[in-house]
Amino acid sequence: MKAVILVGGQGTRLRPLTLATPKPMVPLANKPFVSYVLEHLKEHGISDIVFSMGYLPEGIKAYFGDGSGMGVNLTYVVEDQPLGTAGAVKNVEEHIQDGDFLVLNGDILTDLDISGLIEHHRRKEAMGTIALTPVEDPTAYGLVRTGSESEVLGFLEKPSWDQIDTNLINAGTYVLRSEVLAMIPAGIEYSFERGVFPRLVGKGLYGYSSECYWMDIGTPEKYLQAHYDILEKSVETSVSDCLDQDFVCVQGKIDLKTGAKIVPPVIIGEGTVIEAGARVGRMAVIGPGCTISAGCVVEDSIVQENCTLEREARVRGSIIGAGASIGAGTLVDGGAIVGGNSKVGGDNILTNHIRIYPDTTVKAGTIKF
Ligand code: GDD
Ligand code: MG
């Protein structure tokens, strides 16, 4: 069975991390996010995969190539303009064979039983089957009402609070019959969520709800949470094997100086230097090629590759983009994001979800909130 992964979105909610890097290439535990999606598909025997792309496609192609490095067979289709989720699938129609195919949103970390979803779809002889997952706040998702036979009774994208009568939402993975392609107009923006699914209600559309790990990584909070969940092994990923009994994963050779403290769970990338008196963890992912200087603290945070933290810099609950440097004594806290290659001078206080754009220079002692 073929799978289409939708990766054309701009990832606006993850800016500035997605300004130069498309969401699928934003690293999760030091690997491009979408590599987890590919690994997951492969585990369920799906290896023919089409990437439907729009925004910044080149980095994805350059990294994955024909997919043979991961044991999959990849095809790339780039849109001239965003066609919406369904329009994007219509646009790759020539790569889809008759019968059933899979569609996946490209920003979901999950251990969903894809084989179980396909089986359910076939048992119901469905036109389409949507994986469902419960969430506390369905307003950011597609609400799906189902009946006793798991048939979909209603699909409501981004419902308002007064419309919410179930906690089950569209988990962003579908099995569809190729006949569904005929419902999608070609060449214009059209979505599954506001177009195809509402029209398929009562016409063979089913839901498949299951207990699984599920996270849309599309906001900084969720992106951080996905790291915490990987660190605690709340979700099975290829990184789980690297995390040893003590929940430490070192991805290659690192330079851990005597007197440096590692507080698990942590993941540390190859070639990173951690100096005496620095503390990494708990809950930290440090990319390859970083320098964490004496007296630094990194906890509940992500530091992407090739970053430098100067003496006594502290990073808590925040994200430091690749190649950034944080000056001595600076505090980065409370959901702050420092964009890639930025240079933040010493004695700054970056908190309250502040977002520093990539390649920005912040002079010493200029920001104090
Ligand atoms: N090729 C292509 N073209 N891909 C697109 C386009 C497009 O025009 N628009 C969005 N995508 C891709 C995004 O890159 C992402 O991987 C996926 O489609 C979903 O888009 P998001 O922008 O992340 O949507 P959302 O998170 O607000 O809502 C969707 O996902 C929820 C689950 O996380 C909907 O499918 C909801 O119904 C669902 O609950
Ligand atoms: Mg999303």
Image (spheres, grey):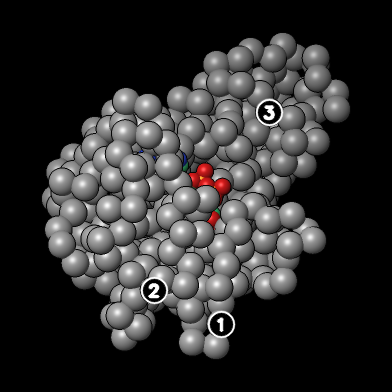
Q: CA distance from mark 2 to mark 3?
A: 45 Å
Give the labeled residue for mark 3: 355
Q: In the displayed structure, does residue 5 sit left or right of residue 167?
A: left
Please give the name of the residue rendered at 23% of the width and 44% of the height, measured from the top-left corner: 92
Instruction: Tell me where residue 359 appears, x and y as whole percent.
Output: 55, 16
Q: Earlier in the sequence, mark 3 or mark 1?
A: 1
Please provide percent x and percent y for residue 146: 56, 77
Residue drawn at point x = 43 percent, y = 64 percent:
200
Q: Name the residue type under label 2.
A: Gly
**Near-viewer residue (118 or 214):** 118
> Which numbered tag is attached to residue 204?
2
Q: Which mark is residue 147?
A: 1
Dividing the image into 4 quarters, which one contains the C terminus? top right
Report how far apart the C-alphas of labels 2 and 1 lie in the structure: 12 Å
Q: Secondary structure at mark 3?
A: strand
Q: Residues within 10 Å of mark 1 (few under 14, many from 20)?
A: few
Q: Is residue 256 above or below residue 262?
A: above
